[in-house]
Image (cartoon, rainbow, N blue to C red):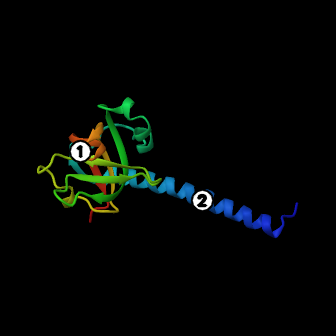
Amino acid sequence: MLLSSQNKTLAALALCLALTVSAGAQTSQTRRQAAIESGDVLLGGVSLAETTPIADLLDEMEQFDGTVVQIEGTVVALCSGMGCWAQLDDGSGNRLNVKVEDGIIDLREVASEEHYMVAEGVFQKTGEHGAQVFIMEHGAVIEGIE
């Protein structure tokens, strides 16, 4: 069967999109693995076997409120005042803050934008800046620190 020029172009675009989505998932998994295996440990690190997708937490805040969860993503913002929170992006535009106690830890000293963080703590649907994961009694691992 011969494909028309237009169909060949559409097939090529579909293949590129599939490869891009696959590469994005693989990159996230690779960064997660690197963080867990050799990242810098903050507080107690992480111990849960799986992460909870940020989208799930945001969609089902009542269900997760008060439970210990693990999230992961690229650091896209840090608290400029005291370094008391870092905002993680899951790669799909879903964002959630990782929170530490004000004045105890300055996340700006251990992470910066573009680092990859796997964090574990108590999900709070209403924190100081909205929904957040409070990690003080748990911790995180951060990949990408030089």
Mark nearer the N terminus (1 vs 2): 2
Point out the residue furthest to the left here. 103
Q: Residue at x 23, y 57 (%)?
A: 79
Q: Are marks 1 and 2 in contact (CB under 8 Å)?
A: no
Q: Residue at x 56, y 55 (%)?
A: 22
10 Å crowding of disc 2: few (<14), some (14-19), many (20+) = few
2 relative position to 43: left or right: right
Residue 16: give x, y in percent of width and height: 63, 63
10 Å crowding of disc 1: few (<14), some (14-19), many (20+) = few
Determine which residue is flagged by label 1: 128
Task: Specify the amino acid type for callout 1.
Answer: Glu
- In this view, the residue in front, 130 or 23, is 130
Q: Residue at x 57, y 60 (%)?
A: 20
Residue 2: give x, y in percent of width and height: 87, 64
The quadrant of the picture occupied by the C terminus is bottom left
Residue 24: give x, y in percent of width and height: 50, 57
Which label sits on residue 32? none
Inter-mark Cα distance, 1 to 2: 39 Å
Determine which residue is flagged by label 2: 19
Q: Nearer the viewer, mark 1 or mark 2?
A: 1
The quadrant of the picture occupied by the N terminus is bottom right
- 52 up-or-down from 34: above or below: above
- In this view, the residue in front, 128 or 38, is 128
Task: Specify the amino acid type for callout 2.
Answer: Leu
Residue 50, by quadrant, is top left
91 relative position to 20: left or right: left
Residue 10, by quadrant, is bottom right
